[in-house]
Amino acid sequence: MNGKYVAYVGSYTREKSNGIHIYDMDVEIGRIVERKEIKINNPSYIVLSSNQKYLYSIADEGVVAYSILPDGDLELMNMKPINGMRGCHLSVTKDNKFLFVSGYHDGKVTVMSLTSSGSIDMVVDEVFHQGFGSIAERNFTPHVSCCVLTPDEELLCVCDKGIDQIKLYEFNKETGKLKLYDIIRSQLESAPKEIIFSQDGRFAYVVCELKNYINVYSYNKNDDKEKFEFIQNIFTLRRDHRVNSAAANIILSHDGKNLLCSNAGDNTVTMYKVDQETGKLSTVSSLPLSGDYPKFLQLFPDDKHFLSMNHNAGTITDFTVHWDRGLIVMNGPEVKISQPNNMVIKKLK
């Protein structure tokens, strides 16, 4: 593809990593080369603003904002606390006026306003989840893992792994305030981790970590009673591989025709075909990723290669993907990085 791209990787800084890693990308051959690190305490999740001018990062101190320079380098703007324990996931409104912070440790959703210059302003709303879950290892308490707006930005979908629910909040686009609208109850002990939407906004895909499956929903913004309708449940693993594994991350191809899901423990990626009329998935293949705990996947802009962030292995592995054959082929040596967690890609002018 024409143009120059840069990738940013969020990581934990408990070991050898210093913070956010910046990589130059060669999209044509599907490779990345590290340029530099930006020092920050435990940038475990990063996200780009909708206009791609700014980058926001989780940190031990709260949330940090960076301006993206013309060459892809980062310039610190400011940091603001979130009035709670450190977050685990970030998302931003299309107009870049609000930032959502998911709180795994304290079960909290934090809404922060953003200034017109992209810096972080203040906390405008915060909601603590209540209730008890069914998973003893998680102390039966709420654990918010993902907050994502519906494509029309009318509802905020909040995945809570601790209580097996996706809570839907009405979102006030002017004030940033949240009001509970409805609850999608997932299967017992399924741990809904992440929700993504099809490009046309008609379907939602929820990866359930502990049951190793994906729930598919249709989304109808005009339905006043039940906007989400459950339409499919499909496993992320081969039938004989469903022990000591956890579904980790899902990502749609840019053309919307395929979906990938990484599986920790099993250390595989499962490829699906997407029926763009019905939204349903059909399994194509499930193949090893050559790295322990593939926590996050990122496709290259041309959909011809993808990267796997292998958290426990301390590597990023690179693959060429052949969608028509359900095949992935390792594309060069692994990239060493301590505890990679997620990646975003920006096109430079």
Image (tube, rainbow, N blue to C red):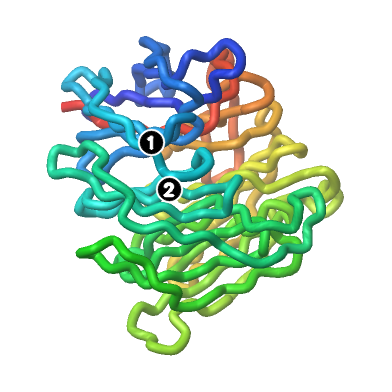
- Residue at 45% in and 68% down: 203
Other-residue count near label 2 (Cα within 10 Å), few / some / many at <14 / 14–19 / ≥20: many
Q: Read off the residue under disc 2.
A: 101
- Residue at 21% in and 26% down: 348
SS of the residue under disc 2: strand
Other-residue count near label 1 (Cα within 10 Å), few / some / many at <14 / 14–19 / ≥20: many
Please, is residue 68 above or below residue 185 in the view? above
* Residue 192 visible in the snapshot: yes
Q: Is the residue under label 1 in contact with that under label 2 (CB below 8 Å)?
A: yes
Residue 168 left/right relative to 294: left
* Residue 1 visible in the snapshot: no
Query: Which kind of residue does numbered mark 1 sit on?
Result: Val
Count of picture labels: 2
Query: Which kind of residue does numbered mark 2 sit on?
Result: Val
Label annotation for residue 24: none
Q: Read off the residue under disc 1.
A: 63
Residue 248 left/right relative to 138: left
